[in-house]
Image (tube, coloured by chain):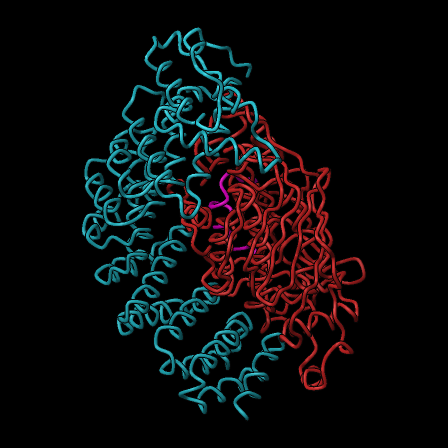
């Protein structure tokens, strides 16, 4: 881009040590002009021409000035980025604005980051194109904080902008983002439904569980599958039967996704200290997945069970180590080593029993070495 | 062979499960028994390709025991005919429903590596995946966890690790992996890239080719308007889909180095992006000079960007050790410890249900190394990393690159 100099910028002094304040004043002066007459002030144009640069000294010259230019400079850069992909005039401003987001988000620069995030968020209500607003959302995905959630939530009703706004809110996380997404879910339609359900699942919002349970039987496969994931990831114990039933579906891909949601639920329950609830889920899967073609599900359920109930799973793991199915026995040997490692301080005999069995169960040298080393450390 | 015949073929696992009792009483023709030029069905492992690009077998052709029975690509130009959901697929989820499929080879762009890897493991398939394994760190953790959980065999599509098994390298690996030496200050310089860049002014281009399902091509990546330069290899130079030549070629260089230096189960704690053009464009990958990654034991792995003038200029010290470098106590421990287990290649691993060399966990750590380097390059600052929590320390923005939200309905 070859920036031209505005007549209004003639009175602007050259950038000096106090150039940042001058830059801000120049940008504000230009921004007050008619949109058609808006141009790049000379100081800003000079800074834009210097980047990107391999010279760290130039970076340290340009970005403090851009940051000190304040909201007016950020708004000017947004305007210069423009709303159309590939506009060559927007390339340097895009480098600058994106670099400014990174620069101001460095540790210890929160005042700068706050100014930029606030300015970006305000622009989401301006009369910009959807593409430009999506770009702003992606910058807020990096530098936004809960203060920017209301502005982002205002885009959740837009088919084009719901996704980038939700992604920014997911990156920000926290209660404000969760509540805003929860409130938006009943009003959502079309592709916005799985977008918001998935986000609430990732944010583990159990307050949404009842609403999401109703989506678990939706006619839209994407809605159904994201609902299963969400209920599993939020560790909603009340959804256990729903998910276990879903895992019995005949449709092969859906069956794998529902099964994975069950496993996820079991792990989340175990993490929350609900070992009994977790055990129920894993044992149900173990008993329902006895066919040879389901051996991978049994592997996963056994691993989950061992992690959830520890020593109480030793007999299950020992039985798996006796299995005639190589595809079950060998992964079980890895589970056995992990279980032995976790219980060996308190239950050394049980751990040794597992490890000795591992040596009979698998030819896998890496697993056998781990067992031998653990046995050596246990003095057996 | 007709599509129906292929579709009805009994997989190796089902064959083993259903024919053992009958085998003794049956006269079996030679082509079934196998011979110098014939593989018995029991030795044949079926696979499908997801992302059927220029390498039609995604590298699986090196093993005779694998037989491709299905191809899948979001661009129907690349699947050799109209999609029929029998042997030619557009949607990998449909292909994974085939029960006669033992394994998949994944040759999609890297933003589409993690999800098919995980879905394949969930469906009980083994996975051979082109490098780099994943586009961001949390994806790699999810793939490694899924493969371990479901007992899937995984191997990454680079083989230099297998060629790095010299006596000296194995000793080096054993010493460092078991922490038998302190104050290691080795530096490994890696020329890892052609350093090609993306186009920062990529315009909207219409129409989207009729053969391409662009929505599915984007998948978990943010929506961006179509341009031919975004897809079909050139995607490598846009941050949403890959990490430039650093991740494109870096995997080849770093996979054996990570093994030799005993770092398959950990990651660096300090990442210094060195001098580099900055800022990076938000969409298009730019150049880099070098990135220095330091592990907790002091070992440094350095990635240099080929083709850039500014090379790595820090002093290079001895980077390898042998048993003779150890003090007596460490030497005694060295002699007691088992030697590194042999690396098993994918074909053998699938048949014997062992983990392959270049498995999911080590490949995740290689990807982490490269992804951390790219985060530091993009942010233009040093990073501190916790290899256990797999989080960047004290830098919230940097951590937002560790687990990037995906577009729905996709999720980890």
Q: Which residues are magenta?
A: B88-102
Q: Is residue A190 visible in the rendered structure shown here?
A: yes
In the picture, the quarter occupied by the N terminus of chain A is top right
**Left or right side of A72 for B63:** right
Q: Nearer the viewer, residue B66 or B183?
A: B183
- Identify by letter the chain in red: B
Determine if the magenta segment contains residue A136: no
In which quarter of the view is residue B12 placed?
bottom right
Image spot of residue A294 (x, y percent): 45, 64
In which quarter of the view is residue B21 placed?
bottom right
**Left or right side of B289 for B384:** left
Q: Nearer the viewer, residue A30 or B188?
A: A30
Q: Nearer the viewer, residue A282 or B265?
A: B265
**Chain A painted colour:** cyan
Vertical side of B291 occupied by A160: above or below: above
Vertical side of A99 occupied by A286: above or below: below
């Amino acid at each position: 881009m070859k920036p031209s100099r505005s007549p209004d910028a003639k009175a602007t002094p050259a950038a000096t040590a106090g150039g940042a304040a001058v830059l801000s004043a120049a940008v504000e002066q230009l921004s007050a002009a008619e949109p058609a007459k808006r141009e790049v002030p000379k100081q800003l144009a000079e800074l834009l021409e210097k980047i990107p640069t391999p010279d760290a000294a130039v970076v340290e010259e340009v970005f403090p000035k851009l940051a000190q230019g304040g909201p007016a400079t950020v708004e000017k850069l947004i305007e210069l980025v423009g709303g159309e992909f590939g506009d060559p005039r927007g390339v340097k401003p895009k480098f600058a604005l994106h670099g400014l987001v990174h620069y101001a988000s460095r540790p210890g620069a929160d005042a700068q980051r706050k100014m930029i995030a606030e300015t970006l968020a305000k622009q989401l209500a301006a009369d910009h194109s959807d593409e430009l607003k999506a770009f702003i959302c992606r910058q807020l995905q990096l530098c936004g904080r809960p203060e920017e959630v209301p502005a982002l939530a205002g885009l959740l009703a837009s088919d084009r902008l719901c996704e980038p706004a939700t992604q920014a809110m997911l990156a920000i996380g926290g209660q404000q983002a969760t509540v805003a997404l929860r409130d938006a879910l009943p009003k959502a339609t079309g592709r916005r439904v799985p977008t918001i359900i998935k986000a609430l699942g990732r944010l583990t919002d159990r307050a949404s569980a009842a609403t999401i349970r109703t989506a678990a039987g939706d006619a839209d496969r994407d809605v159904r599958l994201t609902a299963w994931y969400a209920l599993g990831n939020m560790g909603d114990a009340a959804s256990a039967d729903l998910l276990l039933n879903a895992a019995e579906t005949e449709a092969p891909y859906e069956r794998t996704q529902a099964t994975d949601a069950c496993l996820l639920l079991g792990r989340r329950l175990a993490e929350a200290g609900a070992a009994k609830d977790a055990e129920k889920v894993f044992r149900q899967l173990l008993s329902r997945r006895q066919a040879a073609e389901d051996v991978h599900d049994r592997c996963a359920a056994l691993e989950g069970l061992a992690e959830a109930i520890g020593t109480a799973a030793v007999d299950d793991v020992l039985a798996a180590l006796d299995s005639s199915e190589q595809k079950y026995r060998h992964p079980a040997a890895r589970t056995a080593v992990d279980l032995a490692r976790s219980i060996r301080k308190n239950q050394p005999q049980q751990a040794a029993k597992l490890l000795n069995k591992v040596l009979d169960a698998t030819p896998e040298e890496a697993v056998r070495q781990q067992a031998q080393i653990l046995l050596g450390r246990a003095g057996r | 062979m007709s599509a129906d015949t292929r579709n009805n073929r009994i997989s190796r696992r089902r064959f083993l499960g259903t024919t053992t009792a009958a085998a003794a009483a049956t006269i079996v023709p030679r082509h079934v028994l196998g011979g110098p030029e014939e593989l018995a069905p029991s030795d044949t492992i079926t696979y499908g390709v997801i992302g059927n690009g220029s390498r039609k077998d995604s590298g699986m052709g090196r093993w005779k025991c694998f037989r491709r029975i299905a191809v899948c690509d979001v661009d129907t130009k690349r699947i050799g005919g109209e999609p029929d959901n029998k042997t030619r697929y557009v949607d990998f989820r449909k292909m994974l429903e085939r029960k006669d499929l033992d394994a998949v080879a994944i040759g999609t762009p890297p933003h589409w590596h993690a999800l098919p890897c995980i879905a394949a493991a969930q469906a009980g398939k083994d996975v051979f995946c082109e490098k780099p394994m994943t586009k961001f760190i949390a994806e790699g953790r999810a793939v490694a966890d899924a493969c371990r959980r479901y007992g899937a065999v995984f191997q990454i599509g680079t083989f230099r690790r297998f060629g790095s098994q010299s006596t000296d390298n194995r000793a080096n690996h054993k010493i460092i992996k078991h922490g038998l030496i302190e104050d290691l200050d080795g530096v490994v310089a890696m020329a890892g890239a052609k350093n090609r860049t993306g186009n920062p002014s990529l315009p909207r281009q219409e129409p989207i080719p009729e053969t391409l399902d662009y929505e599915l091509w984007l998948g978990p990546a943010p929506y961006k308007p179509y341009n031919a330069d975004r897809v079909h290899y050139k995607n490598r130079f846009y941050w949403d889909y890959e990490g430039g030549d650093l991740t494109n070629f870096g995997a080849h260089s770093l996979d054996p180095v990570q093994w030799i230096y005993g770092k398959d189960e950990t990651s660096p704690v300090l990442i210094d992006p060195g001098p580099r053009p900055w800022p990076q464009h938000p969409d298009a990958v730019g150049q880099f000079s070098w990135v220095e990654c330091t592990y907790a034991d002091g070992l440094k792995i350095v990635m240099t960007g080929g083709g850039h003038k500014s090379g790595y200029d820090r002093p290079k010290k001895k980077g390898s050790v042998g048993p003779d470098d150890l003090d007596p106590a460490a030497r005694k421990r060295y002699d007691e410890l088992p030697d590194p287990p042999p690396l098993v290649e994918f074909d053998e691993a699938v048949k014997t249900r062992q983990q392959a060399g270049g498995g999911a966990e080590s490949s995740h750590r290689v990807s982490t190394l490269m992804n951390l380097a790219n985060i530091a390059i993009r942010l233009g600052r040093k990073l501190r990393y916790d290899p256990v929590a797999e989080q960047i320390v004290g830098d919230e923005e940097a951590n937002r690159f560790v687990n990037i939200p995906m577009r729905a309905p996709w999720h980890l």
